Image (tube, grey):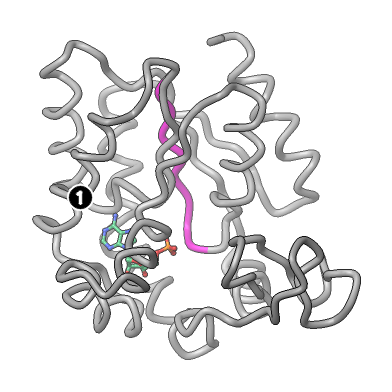
Amino acid sequence: MRVVLLGAPGAGKGTHCKKIVGRYGLLHLSSGDILRRERAEGTDLGKKAQSYMDAGTLVPDDLIVEMMSKAVKAAPRSGFVLDGFPRTVYQAEALDRALAKDDSGIDVVINLQVDDAIVVDRITGRRSCPKCGAVYHVRNMPPKEAGVCDHDGAALVQRPDDTAEVVKNRLATYYEQTEPVVKYYKAQRDVRDVPADGDADAVAAVLFDILDVLK
Ligand code: AMP
């Protein structure tokens, strides 16, 4: 099964992808996570991506398309769920071309819909574990002990691009460059719009209903 999960930053793509991969045995391909790994390892790509990520703008298409085409091609036969990619119409077209080469298109495109005010609250309250990647929210999903990861005791950090200032840029970038991707897919296929303002378990139940029939 090949799933594309769209939505603004803070819509819950990462959270729901984790639930989806657990249930269906898919590979979670998050362009943001791959870029953060490249940065942590100090690779050329990581260095090139750094300034764009810190400013909340998009990393150039050619770098992202190369990185994600490789990841998609290396995915297991069970399939994958894409999180944070494609983020421009150029990237969506490149993904279509990459998948057309081995005759395997996307099975479903899901669009998580969230109010801007909720996005800002979710992102600025988000804290993550630098060791295992677990994600918390200071109010909605706090760790057992404030500032400490439940799984490995590491000190939680705020992503540098999760500050109020950068979130504004990330939302503006979303409306300018990524919302057209939703229109791109809607012009060629059924896109499943899922309201995602509410409780994460309730949203996950709707996603599972959509995906169970594709199993
Ligand atoms: P995310 O974790 O998905 O919010 O991504 C964090 C940052 O990585 C974004 O603000 C962008 O700077 C960069 N990024 C992630 N995915 C892409 C993409 N598909 N195209 C361009 N830049 C991306």
Q: Residues within 10 Å of mark 1 (few under 14, many from 20)?
A: some
Quadrant for residue 166, please give it.
bottom left
Q: Tell me which residue sits at (26%, 23%) in the image.
A: 188
Quadrant for residue 11, please give it.
bottom right
Q: Position of residue 127 (x, y in %)?
A: 66, 75
Residue 5 covered by magenta stretch = yes
Q: Position of residue 45 (x, y in %)?
A: 18, 67
Residue 10 left/right relative to 135: left
Residue 70 covered by magenta stretch = no
- Secondary element at image label 1: helix
Residue projecting furthest to the bottom:
165
Q: Can you tell me which quadrant of the image ligand 1 is in?
A: bottom left
Q: Tell me which residue sits at (27%, 39%) in the image.
A: 71
Q: Tell me which residue sits at (63%, 50%) in the image.
A: 15
Q: Tell me which residue sits at (83%, 74%) in the image.
A: 139
Q: Which residue is mark 1?
A: 67
What are the residue bounds of the magenta stretch?
2-9
